[in-house]
């Protein structure tokens, strides 16, 4: 409520001015005994209702990274550069078969083909408050899912597969000691995505409603008691997690996507110009994706918690900008039970609307997770797939993909090209190529009593 009142006050001030501007404890099922976990201040204390124990003395403190520092424009720190083999020529591939050594989640070769046999790890990474940025490790992801967390903030679930984060330290390439984060709490939709990716989760605690519903996870906390945003996971811990458990990972479960360096063309799939995508999750949590024709990527920008000053996002590990080949908006049925407890319907979806942005164009498409012929034969699930109206695979551009999950029926339209909040959200301009997804915070369905919540 306070957040909404604050946003209303900001909007009234803007209207008065009326001057438009341009512009580690590891737990593989069964889960860790909640009583043994030290929860951050923002999480609900847990009840002891599951088997297994982990004592605090067996959990070494998670080393923390130094606070984020400003990165001068145009400079980067040494980092691993993946050079494509001379014999590799980007080509159309997928959805069911891929050349040897190619990541089926990106359509690109991996530094080490052996990594394809290691299960993916899905890490809960915070985006709030401002001091948590820049995050560490996002330039090494295959997919990143961003969703509305509640109370005016978003969070990421980053999929790490076949491309472990690396960093040059004293002239030597390091991987195992490299840390990813900052890490925050687990959420209900994580379990669906974990199942779809046949992977493991990393998060920092969960409420008593959520923890029993999550499986195959690693809980990590920072050693800093004052700042709950100082939990990180090392690549070594992620490798250990991916290699644990009693099941053998099958790399074929990562298939299902199609990639093509050439964008879709011809009616009805020619696409519309899309030089940018703006999603105002909140007045002080606005996401802006800008297309760079020179590089062929969409670059992520975000306001500095002020609703006005947009800054290009970078990776704390290497100073590189967040540049993604594909940006996808997935519309999904979402239920908020209180301001921060929510579920997103992601399993067994036959066909649901989505938007694909690639190569400066926007394409209305669909996503699905319904059990297909592959799953019926193998008994294994596959990640979300993207198709056209006839159910044919839609080609993504080879590279990384960022997914924005918003409630179903959220309106979208082309607006004026401006960074001014009210001017942009209230002025449609067909043909501008500047797309707006007009997000509105969902209304809690059980604001006073959670005892009757039908949690998935």
Image: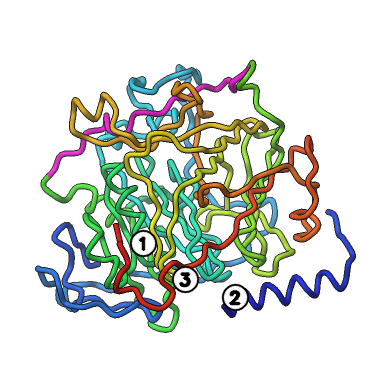
Mark found first going from the N terminus, 3 or 1? 1
Q: CA distance from mark 2 to mark 1?
A: 21 Å
Describe residue 177's horizontal placement relative to residue 333 as left or right: left
Please tell me whether residue 192 belongs to the stretch shown in magenta.
no
Q: Is residue 172 visible?
A: no
Describe residue 16's horizontal placement relative to residue 330 as left or right: right
Given this view, does label 3 or label 1 mark the residue nearer the observer? 3
Q: Are marks 3 and 1 in contact (CB under 8 Å)?
A: no
Q: Secondary structure at mark 2?
A: helix
Tell me which segment is drawn in magenta. 247-265
**Residue 132: percent from the left, percent from the top?**
52, 67
Q: Is residue 143 visible?
A: yes
Given this view, does label 2 or label 1 mark the residue nearer the observer? 2
Q: Residue at x 78, y 38 (%)?
A: 430
Q: Residue at x 43, y 83 (%)?
A: 226
Q: Which residue is mark 1?
A: 187
Mark found first going from the N terminus, 3 or 2? 2
Describe residue 297's horizontal placement relative to residue 135 as left or right: right
Please tell me whether residue 256 belongs to the stretch shown in magenta.
yes
Mark found first going from the N terminus, 2 or 1? 2
Colouring of the image: rainbow
Q: Residue at x 65, y 45 (%)?
A: 412
Closer-to-camera residue (25/87) = 25
Q: Which residue is mark 2?
A: 3
Q: Residues within 10 Å of mark 1 (few under 14, many from 20)?
A: many
Closer-to-camera residue (102/13) = 13
Q: Which residue is mark 3?
A: 339
Q: Residues within 10 Å of mark 3 (few under 14, many from 20)?
A: some
Q: Residue at x 48, y 70 (%)?
A: 66
Q: CA distance from mark 3 to mark 1?
A: 13 Å
């Amino acid at each position: 409520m306070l957040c909404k009142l604050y946003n209303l006050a900001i909007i009234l001030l803007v209207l008065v001015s009326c001057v438009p501007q341009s512009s580690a404890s590891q737990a593989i099922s069964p889960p860790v005994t909640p009583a043994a976990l030290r929860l951050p201040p923002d999480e609900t204390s847990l009840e002891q209702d599951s088997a297994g124990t982990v004592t605090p003395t067996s959990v070494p403190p998670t080393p923390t990274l130094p606070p984020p520092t400003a990165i001068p424009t145009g400079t980067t720190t040494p980092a691993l550069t993946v050079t494509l083999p001379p014999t590799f020529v980007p080509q159309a591939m997928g959805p069911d078969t891929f050349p040897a050594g190619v990541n089926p989640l990106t359509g690109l070769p991996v530094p080490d083909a052996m990594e394809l046999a290691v299960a993916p790890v899905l890490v809960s990474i915070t985006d709030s408050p401002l001091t948590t940025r820049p995050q560490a490790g996002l330039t090494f992801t295959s997919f990143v899912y961003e969703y509305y967390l509640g109370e005016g903030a978003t969070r990421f679930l980053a999929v790490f597969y076949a491309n472990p984060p690396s960093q040059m330290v004293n002239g030597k390439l390091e991987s195992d000691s490299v840390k990813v984060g900052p890490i925050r709490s687990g959420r209900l939709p994580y379990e669906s995505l974990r199942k779809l990716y046949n992977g493991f989760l990393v998060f920092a605690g969960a409420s008593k409603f959520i923890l029993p519903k999550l499986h195959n996870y690693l809980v990590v906390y920072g050693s800093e008691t004052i700042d709950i945003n100082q939990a990180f996971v090392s690549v070594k811990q992620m490798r250990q997690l991916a290699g644990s458990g009693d099941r053998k990972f099958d790399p074929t479960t990562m298939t299902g996507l199609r990639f093509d360096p050439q964008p879709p063309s011809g009616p009805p799939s020619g696409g519309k110009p899309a030089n940018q995508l703006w999603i105002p999750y909140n007045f002080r949590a606005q996401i802006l994706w800008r297309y760079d024709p020179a590089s062929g990527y969409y670059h992520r920008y975000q306001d500095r918690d002020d609703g006005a000053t947009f800054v290009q996002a970078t990776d704390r590990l290497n100073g590189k900008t967040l540049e993604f080949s594909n940006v996808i908006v997935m519309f999904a049925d979402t239920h908020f039970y209180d301001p921060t407890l929510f579920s997103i319907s992601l399993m067994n979806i036959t066909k649901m609307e989505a938007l694909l942005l690639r190569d400066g164009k926007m394409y209305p498409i669909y996503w699905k997770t319904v059990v297909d012929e592959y799953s019926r034969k193998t008994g294994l699930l596959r990640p979300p797939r993207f198709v056209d109206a006839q159910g044919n695979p839609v080609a993504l551009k080879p590279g990384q993909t960022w997914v924005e999950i918003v409630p179903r029926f959220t309106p979208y339209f082309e607006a004026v090209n401006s960074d001014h909040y009210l001017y942009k959200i209230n002025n449609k301009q067909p043909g501008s190529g500047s797309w707006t997804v007009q997000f509105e915070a969902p209304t809690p369905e059980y604001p006073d009593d959670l005892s009757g919540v039908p949690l998935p």
